[in-house]
Structure formats: C-alpha cells, structure tokens
Image: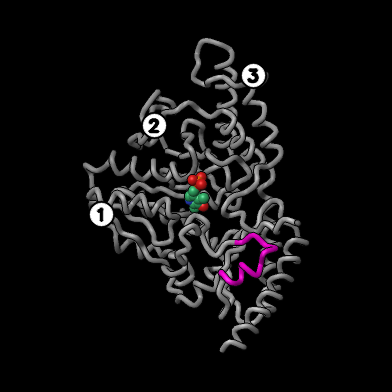
Amino acid sequence: MKLPVYLDYASTTPVDCRVAKIMMQYLTKDGIFGNASSRFHRYGWEAEEAVNVARDNIATFLGTYSDNIIFTSGATESNNLAIKGVAYAYKHRGKHIITSMTEHKTVLNVVYYLEKLGFCVTCLSPEKDGIICLNTLKKEIRDDTILFSLIHANNETGVVQNIEEFGNFCHSCGILFHVDATQSIGKIPINLNKLPIDLMSFNGHKVYGPKGIGGLFIRRDLKISVQPQIHGGGQEYGIRSGTLPVHQIVGMGEAYRILKQEMKNEVIRFRFLKNYLWKELQNITYVSVNGNLKKSIATILNVAFHNVNSELLMIELQDLAVSPSSACVSSSLESSYVLHSMGYCDDIVNSSIRFSLGRFTTLEEIKFALCKIKMAIIRLRKKTLYTK
Ligand SMILES: *Cc1c(COP(=O)(O)O)cnc(C)c1O
C-alpha cells in the first residue's frame, strides 16, 4: 500500500540522508566511537573534535559563540533545564514566573510543577489571533518576577511572537527571558548576537536531525546561572552531565549546517506551498484559518472545517498524515488548549486540523491532499445533512 502523504512535519521530520550518512561514521569500531571526554588518547580527541565542529555549526547558524551552547536530550529537557534551572538559581530574588497559555506542554507542565513547589506562575492569554501583547506582560510584571518564558513560533498554529520586543522589555526590568524556538528554527532567521534573549531551547528532530538530541543556549557572558538538573561527570561545564552522544551531536550539527546553507530558499518554497494550500482550501465553503496568517511560519497552517468533526475527517483522510492539534497531547486526545486559549469555541476547535509542510513536501503532494480533503468534506457534510 502507498504510504500516506506526510503533512505532519511539525511533530517530527525524517532525518536528512546527508545527516544519517555522517552519523553512521560515529558508531562502529571502524568509525569515531570514542568518549569525547577521554583526554589521553586519539579516540577521545577525535570524538571531541567532532563535537566541537558540530557545536560550531549550531552556534554559527544561531549567531552566537559555541561556549553558549549546551547539549541536552531534546527540547523537552532544554525547557526543563532553562526554567527549573533559573527558578532554583534565582529563587532568593523572587519566585514569580511568567509564561503564556499557548506554550508547548514541555513548558506548561514545568511551570505547573514549580507552582506546586511554591513558585508563583502567571500564564498570559493571547489575543484572538494568537499574538501576545506586550501590554499583557506589562500588567503582570511584579518586583519578584524572575523569568519570562515565551514560545517563538507556536507548534499548533505557527503564530510567531515578537521576541525582540519582549526581550527588550524584560531586560529593561531585569527579568531573564527564555524562548522556546523549537518550531521557529529553520523557518525564521535567529541572530542571538542581536536578539535580547538569555536562554533558548531547540532540538534536532524538528529540523531533519535525529531525535533524542537538543540544545540550550545560555548567554554565559552575562553570567546567567542555571542550576543543573542532571548531576554526574560534569560534562557541558557541569550544567548537564552525561557522556556526550557523539553521533547524535554530529547529526544535529550537520542538520544545522544544512539549514545555514539552504534555509533561505527552502522558506520561499514553503511559503509558496502554504499559500497554494490555503488558496485552494478556500474553494471549500466554511473554512477559516486559526491564528494570524500573516504572522505565522511558512510551514504550519491550522484550518477549521466548520461543521466537520476533525477526528472523523482524519479517519476519512487515510491517505494523509496530519494532526488534529499538537501531536504531544494526541495520546490523550484532549482538544487543543492552545486554540481554546485564543477564545475559539468547542465547535471550531473540534473541527480544526494542523497541516505542516517540510523539506520533502512537493506541489504534487499538496494537490493530492487538496483533492482528498475536498472529497472527504463533501462526504462528511452530506452525511450530517442526512442524519439531521
Ligand atoms: C517538539 C517540541 C518540543 C519538544 O521537543 P523534543 O525534542 O521532542 O523533546 C518543545 N517545544 C516545542 C515548541 C516543540 O514543537
């Protein structure tokens, strides 16, 4: 059977063949398998050199120095390390943390956990279009606020927040600013040399690198302290212990090196495909976009098909791989808290589907998807007509 057309790149991406090829050289006995911390022989030195190259590639792509990059097991761990690490290191200064209702679960569940430990948490509500206003933050700021954590591009709607504006404001009040950039990497240029960001999370597997590897940017020249969450051999400046997974790191480094070369053209292509998809979807009656279409990344389109249940629609769409909302919560199939926080009613939330495109999406695939969607919607709307 032919595989469904993959339109779920926001949940994960396939590893780029160029990345897989390089990773293979860092596993077996005839490859570079050493422990990057082994100081006394060539196996260790070669592994360390490979890690250095990867770290440099990532730092260069993000416009920063490699000393500012810490490797983790993924963006989940990076968000945990950034938020818990700052909370514990600065709790003598205050216990108030601000974030938003539209964060990924890996941020929300961290702050809810900290709340149980006695921290005070405020979650800002977005406007109807998913954008958070600076004024909303200004109203909630207190003298014991230590951290503001904000998602850059939302994983369900693709909506992009103005991180520069928020960063400048945080710095003017002496508050640390953490950004979850997992979805914006490779879609929006990020220059950490210019942006007022103190900590930033990102990973490998959303940008054609392997799963199980991520990074946390910590602006170490500002002497920001982050309390380690994993203790051990003292790797990564003691901030994140654990033997470095050299093959994963090398893979992520290669993924970011490719982004540096190809992102600009790739994003133009994504934009074209997304515009085409949305233009053609509008030939179906009663469809609307969730979130600010103009202020969203080029790979995510979240659409409500009014009067159609999105779960039934996905059952009809066996030829497409799409998500009702965030894949991370789909195991529990609760409806999207992100869309709810934007003020959408249940009817819209339960009829919404997220399309996400990527490096291997073709115009043919989009045309195929459109054809299937149109037919499925017609079938489902007819059914509800008859049963009503
Ligand atoms: C996927 C994702 C994460 C989690 O990343 P992992 O590397 O899978 O742990 C965190 N934040 C956002 C916005 C994401 O899209």
Q: Residue furthest right?
A: 364
The residue tagged 3 is: 29
Q: CA distance from mark 2 to mark 3?
A: 30 Å
Q: Which residue type does callout 1 highlight?
A: Cys
Say which residue appears at 61% left-offset and 61% top-offset: 322
Say which residue appears at 42% left-offset and 38% top-offset: 219
Q: Residue furthest top?
A: 40
The residue tagged 2 is: 239
Number of marks in picture: 3
Question: Callout 2 environment at 10 Å: few (<14), some (14 to 19), or many (20+)?
Answer: many
Q: CA distance from mark 1 to mark 2?
A: 25 Å
Say which residue appears at 68% left-offset and 71% top-offset: 373
Q: How is the image coloured?
A: one colour
- Residue 367 image position (x, y, % from top left): 75, 66
221 or 85: which is nearer to us? 85
Mark positioned earlier in the residue sequence (2 or 3): 3
Span highlighted in magenta in the image: 311-322
SS at mark 3 in the image: loop
Kindly identify which numbered label has been placed on residue 120. 1
